[in-house]
Image (cartoon, helix red, strand yellow):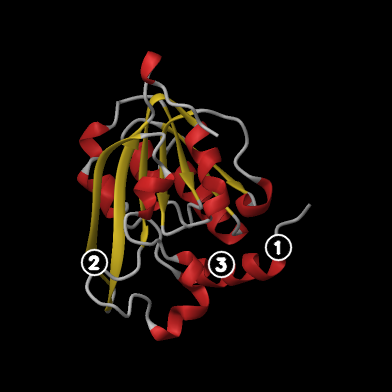
Amino acid sequence: MPPRSDSRDKWNNRHSSQELGLAACEVLQKHIHLLAKHGTALDLACGLGRNAIELAQHGLQCDAVDISDVAIDRLQKYAKENNLNINAERADIERDGIGNKKYDVIVVSYFLYRPLLPAIIRALKPGGLLFYQTFVRSVTSENSVPRASLAKASFYLEKNELCSQLKQLEIRYYHETILDRNTNTASIAMLVASMPTGDNTKQIS
């Protein structure tokens, strides 16, 4: 089945003019030292692939998935021109999921679809790392979601929600903070977690 045209068109328009090759998300930059020099990685809902580019430059073989064919086409071209080991594919992950492949590293930035979280956990190899960064209801005020964004409230995490949703993993870092994003500020949750190994592996539903 083809991707949902309304969502695809929205992201195609956005990614057609945005700059490619920007810095990776802050939580990945901050903890880049945790990465091995080889292995497999997934940049989920990758957009123009800023995280995938960072991962591939670090030496990982990276899959990058997004609903936007414009973003995927641009990322494929960039990867080829820069000799980066990135396999970029278009997919509607909210509808089709992420498959059964296992990864050493998964990065998710500014994407939240709660029904997919168990699949993300299952996609981690033992010892695999998850870097997750996205919007959270404001850590500074009672009016936790901007009025203009109330219709999109499902895209915002509740306070500490990411830790509870990912409790099968070992939380290695978690922080909620305010970041400057272009001309605006935003409340952000940042997490690094790992899949337990050996006898410490927890049951995943």
Task: Give the mark nearer the N terminus: 1 vs 3.
Answer: 1
Q: Where residue 111 sits in the image (x, y, percent)?
A: 47, 57
The answer to whether 166 appears left or right of 159 in the picture is right
Snapshot quadrant of residue 161: bottom left
Q: Are marks 2 and 3 in contact (CB under 8 Å)?
A: no
Which comes sooner in the sequence, label 2 or label 3? Answer: 3
Alpha-carbon span between mark 2 and mark 1? 31 Å
Label 2 belongs to which residue?
A: 179
Instruction: Name the residue at the right extreme.
Output: 1
Circles 2 and 1 in contact, beta carbons < 8 Å: no
Q: Residue at x 52, y 56 (%)?
A: 74
Using a 10 Å C-alpha cutoff, classify the residue at mark 1 as few (fewer than 14 neighbours), some (14 to 19) or many (20 or more): few
- Position above or below: 68 against 119: below
What number is the disc on residue 4? Answer: 1
Pick out the residue farthest to the bottom. Answer: 147
Relative depth, front residue between 198 and 73: 198
The vertical placement of 179 against 86, above or below, is: below
Q: Based on the displayed image, in which of its 4 quarters is residue 146 positioned? A: bottom left
